[in-house]
Image (spheres, grey):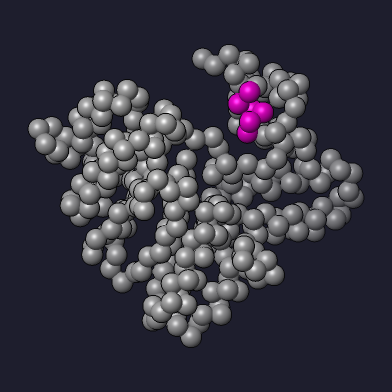
Amino acid sequence: MSSITDLIKELREKTGAGFLDCKKSLEENDNNIEKSIEALRKKGLAKASKKSDRVANEGAVGIYSNSDITLLIKVNSETDFAAKSDTFLSFLDTLGELALKNNSNLNKDQFLKLKYENGNVQDYFNSMIAKIGENLILNDLIIKENKNSKYAFYIHNSYRKNIGKIISLLEYSSSGNNDEIRTLTKNLCMHIAAMKPESMDINDLDKALVTKEEKIQRELILNSGKPSNIVDKILEGKMKKFYSEVTFLNQSYILDQDKTIRTIIDEYSETDFKLISFELISL
């Protein structure tokens, strides 16, 4: 079990709140981190947190594709030093190529059970753990069938041309595939990596996340002393701002802050350009 000092440190990292505020919140919430974060936010003492902001281990993400599938694979290591090594990067490439050869939409458990050399992929992990001297974990494996879709990607902090600390992948369709479309999709991938949207649009957001945010914002408004008859109107504005921060289509485009992503997409309607999905994996 984590000591109270470790819990306070974790809570401070996730909220930016002061030491004493974190200590008091933990005491009042049975040392539960998530409840303490929510309590601090209700008091206006913590910044908003998203899944993508949480502290991650070291490692790297790789992208691989053939005519049938495109995939992202993330392996965690204990140190950045190991993640940058040729041994680790070649290990990640081998895993990516193995997943491509299988050409199936595997989950992580199924992938680890795949036959490899004289054992399976999990045995391969175990041998690399012994070789590198650090624990290695298959954290993410996302496989997408190409079919009629097109893909663009962006790698941030790259170690190799297909491996880095952050990879964003955009799935789209378009009747054109000229330089203008390629530039657009590359820029949209850069936007995803920078702005870290939680979902494509408002209806795609986790309902529990929306409910939690509404509850927090309502309490913040009430605690500010605003008249009860205007609380709902203020809340509407607060939630509109929240949606503009966490949903891809409603975010301000990083290359033109006066336009949203939705507006940018509409400008390419003559090519039947449509966004299908996006993925973001980071360390």
Residue at 71% from the left image edge and 24% from the top image edge: 22
In depth, the one of 183 and 19 nearer the eye is 183
Asked if the stretch drawn in magenta spans residue 68, the answer is no
Relative image position of residue 132 (x, y in whole percent): 30, 26
- In which quarter of the view is residue 87 placed? top left
Left or right relative to 93: residue 201: right
In depth, the one of 11 and 26 nearer the eye is 11
Relative image position of residue 174 (x, y in whole percent): 40, 77
The residue at the far front in this view is 86
Residue at 47% from the left image edge and 68% from the top image edge: 185
User: What secondary structure do most residues of the magenta stretch adopt?
Assistant: helix
Asked if the stretch drawn in magenta spans residue 13, the answer is yes
161 in relation to 50, above or below: below
Left or right relative to 30: residue 77: left
Can the viewer see residue 25 in this picture?
no
Residues rendered magenta in the picture = 9-14
